[in-house]
Image: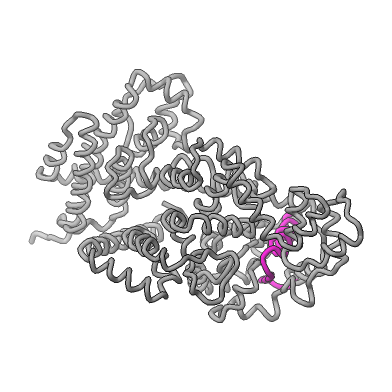
């Protein structure tokens, strides 16, 4: 009796047909696109000129285009879709699409780079669809690929559209199906290996640069009774929480202790996200009883961050188990830990395993303040009376000493600086805005790029960079922004590796305040949506904070417009959690906007459901075949 147990299903035929399209006509079209930008005869010279700017290549890729034995002598037919994407992105001078290379483009963006991205994303989707592809998903993917091919045909003057239609109607030979499917899966495995190598190199480099930054700052470290208590506490416990107000020295102390353990030969992990700890736990890349994590602001900075806190709670069981084998030293602002929603592991350890460094028992004494001030400004010519007035400062004292040492002021100005740091820094930024626009623009870029900026970010996220320039009413090259950030090192910014950050949250908060008060509408339109969730509030909000940007009712229209736009993007959850959505006027305006665009909203929800299904399939593949790796 004939068996149908192993007969081809419609779903598997769909995924194999899509694989055939991508491995066949789409790859050939990308080869012709490479010929369009770089004629084969010019390729050896071009690739040799760009060899040091290329991202990490696999050994076969490097041997193909940069052979040790001499010049490239192959043909474009030797290149697969992965290598073609790398070359088109990095050596052809193709302008990045609006969302930047490596990101999902807007549906309205039909640029060359946006269409190259669509083929890459379709390849990834097919590679991760291990169980086949439904008819609905297949039709959507096919339509997207076909539209992309038609767009690229217009650039090339070649008709690949007919090849797409031929593959759609042609019969599928079982051996041919498997061949195309195997090719696609081989490429996906190659991508995973590349990603693993790149991630490892980046993490090691970042860790090395972070330790170097810590060592530079540690040269001015002054032991205090608070730091000594924390050292004793972490010796005897696996979790210690260091709390205090902004600028009180929390990070400085836990970094110092991290360096102490590094000298002892321990494995020290500076981490920014709880997911990093989970990855280390899952992969087992730690030494039991000789590993310590240094973690600043795990659940929020200015206030409890709903997304970060949810992630922490999700991983709390893992953290509890892991803390039996490693140590963890956390810093957190007091106002965040005081939030009534904080429960579980953090709350349980607040009484016995925490130090409030600016509380009554551990706050800096005048003697400790004097030592810190003299360590940072050894040659400052202040009288005892002036110094006594400076030592009365409670808020931000350790931070202000650092900042004062980097930017010398006269003695009279020093007193004002320590008494009114917000006003002094605000005036400095406002002076940049008027008299040193490139410096001001560099700080604006750092704010709108979410406090993490390197040269490549300015090149890739062209649209966001242009918005920064528009806000500052200036036209300058990305190189100028980087040069200006270099002039601000130690004053406003710090540099770890090739990436710039604000020197301290306080400086970002003041810069953000100046930007938002001067340009509320532009800030709402262009700032990252997570920035809006954390920083923007309506003027009638209770419990106001001096660093928050408060906007009037007249700005509700632009706020609703931004929320509406983001609902159709990947950051939907940031809109849902935005505190401004608690305002009745905002809710009513947004409801009205959604009702006027109900058809577009329905289409968006269908796409989002498909994306969630894809992410779930990716998660399954990673869990079963590639644990611990990132696609």
Image-quadrant location for residue 96: top left
Q: In the displayed structure, would residue 121 be above or below residue 610?
A: above
Q: In the displayed structure, would residue 523 be above or below residue 70?
A: below
> In the rendered view of the protein, which quadrant contains the N terminus?
bottom left
Q: Residue at the location (31% across, 43% down)?
A: 114
User: Seen in the image, is 549 located left or right of residue 116?
Assistant: right
Q: Residue at the location (61% across, 51% down)?
A: 430
Q: In the displayed structure, would residue 239 be above or below residue 616?
A: below
Q: Residue at the location (26% across, 61% down)?
A: 604
Image-quadrant location for residue 395: bottom right
Name the outermost residue toward the right. 384
Name the outermost residue toward the left. 1
Q: State how the image is colored.
A: one colour
Depth order, front residue of 403/375: 403
Residue 278 at x, y percent in the picture: 53, 63
Depth order, front residue of 209/419: 419
Q: How many marks?
A: 0
User: Seen in the image, is 145 located left or right of residue 282?
Assistant: left
* Residue numbers of the magenta segment: 236-262
Residue 187 at x, y percent in the picture: 34, 43
Q: In the displayed structure, would residue 465 be above or below residue 68?
A: below
Depth order, front residue of 407/152: 407
Q: Is residue 155 magenta?
A: no
User: Seen in the image, is 99 located left or right of residue 309?
Assistant: left
Residue 568 at x, y percent in the picture: 31, 60
Depth order, front residue of 592/369: 592
Q: Is residue 240 magenta?
A: yes
Q: From this viewpoint, is residue 191 visible? A: yes
Q: From this viewpoint, is residue 200 visible? A: no
Residue 498 at x, y percent in the picture: 58, 42
């Amino acid at each position: 009796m004939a068996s149908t147990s192993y007969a081809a299903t419609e779903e598997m035929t769909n995924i194999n047909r899509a694989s055939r399209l991508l491995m066949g006509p789409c790859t050939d079209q990308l080869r012709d696109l490479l010929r369009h930008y770089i004629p084969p005869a010019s390729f050896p010279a071009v690739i040799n000129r760009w060899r040091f700017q290329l991202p990490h290549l696999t050994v076969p890729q490097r041997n193909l285009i940069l052979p040790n034995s001499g010049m490239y002598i192959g043909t474009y037919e030797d290149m697969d879709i992965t290598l073609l994407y790398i070359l088109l992105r990095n050596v052809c001078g193709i302008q990045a699409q609006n969302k930047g290379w490596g990101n999902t483009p807007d549906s309205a963006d039909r640029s060359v780079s946006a269409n190259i991205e669509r083929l890459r994303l379709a390849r990834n989707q097919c590679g991760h669809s291990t169980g086949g592809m439904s008819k609905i998903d297949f039709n959507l993917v096919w339509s997207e690929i076909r539209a992309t091919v038609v767009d690229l045909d217009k650039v090339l003057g070649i008709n690949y559209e007919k090849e797409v239609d031929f593959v759609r109607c042609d019969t599928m030979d079982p051996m041919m199906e498997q061949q195309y499917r195997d090719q696609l899966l081989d490429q996906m495995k190659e991508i995973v290996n590349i990603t693993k190598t790149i991630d490892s190199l980046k993490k090691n480099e970042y860790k090395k640069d972070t330790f170097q930054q810590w060592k530079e700052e540690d040269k001015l470290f002054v032991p205090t009774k608070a730091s000594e208590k924390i050292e004793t506490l972490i010796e005897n416990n696996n979790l210690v929480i260091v709390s205090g107000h902004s600028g009180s020295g929390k990070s400085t102390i836990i970094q110092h202790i991290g360096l102490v353990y590094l000298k002892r030969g321990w494995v020290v992990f500076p981490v920014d996200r709880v997911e990093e700890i989970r990855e280390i736990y899952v992969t087992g890349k730690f030494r039991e009883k000789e590993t310590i994590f240094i973690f600043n602001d795990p659940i929020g900075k200015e206030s409890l961050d709903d997304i970060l806190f949810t992630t922490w709670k999700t991983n709390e069981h893992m953290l509890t188990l892991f803390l039996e084998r490693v140590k963890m030293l956390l810093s957190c602002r007091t106002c965040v830990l005081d939030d009534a929603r904080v429960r579980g592991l953090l709350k349980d350890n607040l009484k016995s395993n925490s130090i409030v460094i600016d509380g009554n028992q551990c706050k800096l004494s005048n003697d400790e303040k004097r030592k810190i001030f003299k360590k940072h400004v050894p040659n400052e010519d202040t009288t005892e009376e002036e110094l006594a007035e400076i030592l009365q400062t409670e808020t931000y004292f350790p931070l202000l000493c650092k900042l004062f040492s980097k930017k010398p002021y006269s003695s009279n100005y020093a007193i004002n600086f320590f008494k009114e740091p917000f006003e002094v820094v605000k005036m400095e930024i406002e002076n940049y805005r008027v008299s040193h626009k490139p410096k001001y623009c560099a700080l604006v870029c750092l704010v709108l790029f979410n406090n993490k900026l390197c040269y490549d970010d300015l090149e890739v996220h062209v649209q966001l960079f242009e918005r920064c320039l528009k806000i500052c009413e200036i036209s300058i090259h990305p190189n100028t922004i980087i040069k200006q950030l270099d002039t601000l090192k130690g004053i406003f910014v710090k540099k770890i590796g090739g990436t710039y950050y604000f020197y301290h949250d306080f400086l970002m908060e003041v810069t953000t305040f100046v930007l938002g008060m001067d340009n509320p509408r532009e800030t709402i339109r262009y700032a990252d949506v997570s920035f809006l969730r954390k920083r923007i509030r309506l003027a009638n909000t209770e419990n106001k904070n001096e660093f928050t940007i408060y906007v009037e009712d007249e700005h509700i229209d632009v706020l609703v417009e931004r929320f509406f736009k983001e609902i159709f993007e990947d950051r939907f959850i940031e809109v849902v959690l935005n505190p401004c959505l608690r305002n009745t006027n905002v809710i009513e305006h947004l409801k009205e906007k959604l009702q006027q665009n109900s058809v577009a909203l329905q289409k968006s929800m269908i796409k989002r459901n498909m994306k969630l299904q894809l992410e779930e399939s990716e998660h399954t593949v990673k869990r079963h075949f590639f644990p611990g790796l990132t696609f």
